[in-house]
Image (cartoon, rainbow, N blue to C red):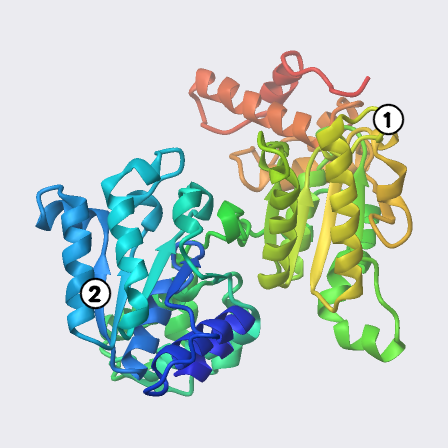
Amino acid sequence: MSLYISQCYGDPGERLAQLFELAFGSDTKDKAFTADTILLHGEAGVGKSKALDILADEYRLKIFRISLGQLTADYDGRLALGLERTVWRAFEAKSSLVILEDIDLLFPRYADAQDNGLFLVLDRCLRQLSSHQVLLVGTTRHLRSLDQSVKSLFQDVIQLVIPTPKERAVMLAYLVERTLLKMDNVDILSLASQAHAFMASNLAQWCRLAEEKAIQESCPKVTQLHFEATLSHIRVLGHQGTMAEKPDPVRWADIGGLQQAKDALEESAVWIYKHADAYQRLGIRPSKGVLLYGPPGTGKTLLAKAVATESSANFLPIKVPDLIKAEVGESEKALTAIFQTAVRCSPSVIFLDELEAVFSSRETSGDVGRKLISQFLIEMDQLNKGDHHVILLGATNHLEAIDPSIVCPGRLDRLVYIGPPTQDERLAILKVLAKTTRVNPATDLAHIAASTEGYTGADLKAVLRKAGLMALKRDESHEIELADLVLALTHVSPSLV
């Protein structure tokens, strides 16, 4: 089981397994290397409790769980008394594991923990751990919310993060072996490759849903089809709140016009996933940075989603508020976390919209902006060094405002211009939009395309929406007619003149 923890969580998992081995693997503990206290942190669902349960079962430890809710309910709010009594029961049980669940709720930051009776009890209990074969582990989802004086009491701090594709496969194999129903020709590697950004809880939920699906269909065994049918029911939340999501499917055919941009993105951002072996045989490393630039409303965000869909990659949309933090150094940490999430959720597409808002020239940026630019360059260079299936897509309306170091070779070096749609492209956009609205098939869309010089794709979408309202007012055929579209043009002005 220790090997399983190492295979599922990499170096942090191996370190956790080693600490348990040193603490409980032999009758004599070498105190020079053993930690009596561990602070385990990671996102909700990453598998902190499950990892501890597995290790406790391997070493036959009795588990004592302590939480704010449990202490409040069992000891009428006398938290210090409840903590002390629970730890003493662990001492009497000898080989045991004490788990302080969500320890940040017991000892929140800025709460003057050292003046709290609960802190004094914890400190006193920890001083006596060395004379007992007891390991105390605090778990938290929000390490920054924990009082620093409490954090300093722990000898080792370990973070469990989103599993890589290989680690997901190990987790899934473990869960599949322990399902109630038997499996029928389930391809674990294939399933793991579809489980983008899944954490331990997501994989467990997936197995449970597949079992329920099989039971509903009166099948004695769970098949690959049961897993694939329930995949879309699972919502994934990535590292530190950053979404690593499967966007709503957007195919190239769903985007009217922009053929040159589609071809460029196909070469730069899709082939790297679909033809990775060919790149390796040729000995070349494709660019991992693409910058979409052009007027607003021309479809840059839609193209980014299409790249994620066509390459079967995760989509991480990043906005300015995700990067701007009040505390010193936190903005750089947020940027680093985004790249770490993308690597562990690979294949993935990071989409940075309104790039100029954060990464403008150093001369015009403030102190935070300059530090973010430096950190961004470091992360991009690291991305290019490794064999990571991560693409960075940037979008901007003002190319001239971007710092030159960001668009140099090896970074966002593939520039793709997304300009105003031509008349033919406007017609193609209208035809795509007409597929999802009730437009009379006899409507002359070519006439509208010819009459919308200066309209972007977003403008045309607004025209269709306004025309729909006009049709509702008429309340006749419940279809959008040419007259509705012509009237809508008088209400929706072109963005580009």
Q: Quadrant of residue 172?
A: bottom left
Residue 433 as seen in the image, left or right of residue 18? right
Q: Observer-nearest residue: 465 or 44?
A: 44
Q: Residue at x 37, y 85 (%)?
A: 25
Query: In the figure, is residue 131 to the left or right of 454?
Result: left
Marks 1 and 2 sit apart, C-alpha to C-alpha, by 57 Å
Please name the amino acid that badge 2 sits on.
Phe
Which percent across, then down, holds residue 344?
Answer: 59, 63
319 relative to 150, above or below: above
Disc 1 residue type (three-letter): Glu
- Location of the N terminus by quadrant is bottom left
Q: Which mark, residue 363?
A: 1
Which is more toward the observer, 98 or 309?
98
Task: Determine the secondary structure under disc 2.
Answer: strand
Q: Which residue does the numbered mark 2 point to in the structure image? A: 64
Residue reaching furthest top? 490
Q: Residue at x 37, y 73 (%)?
A: 226
Relative image position of residue 119 (x, y in whole percent): 29, 45
Quarter of image, res 297? top right
| Left or right: residue 148 compared with residue 122 | right
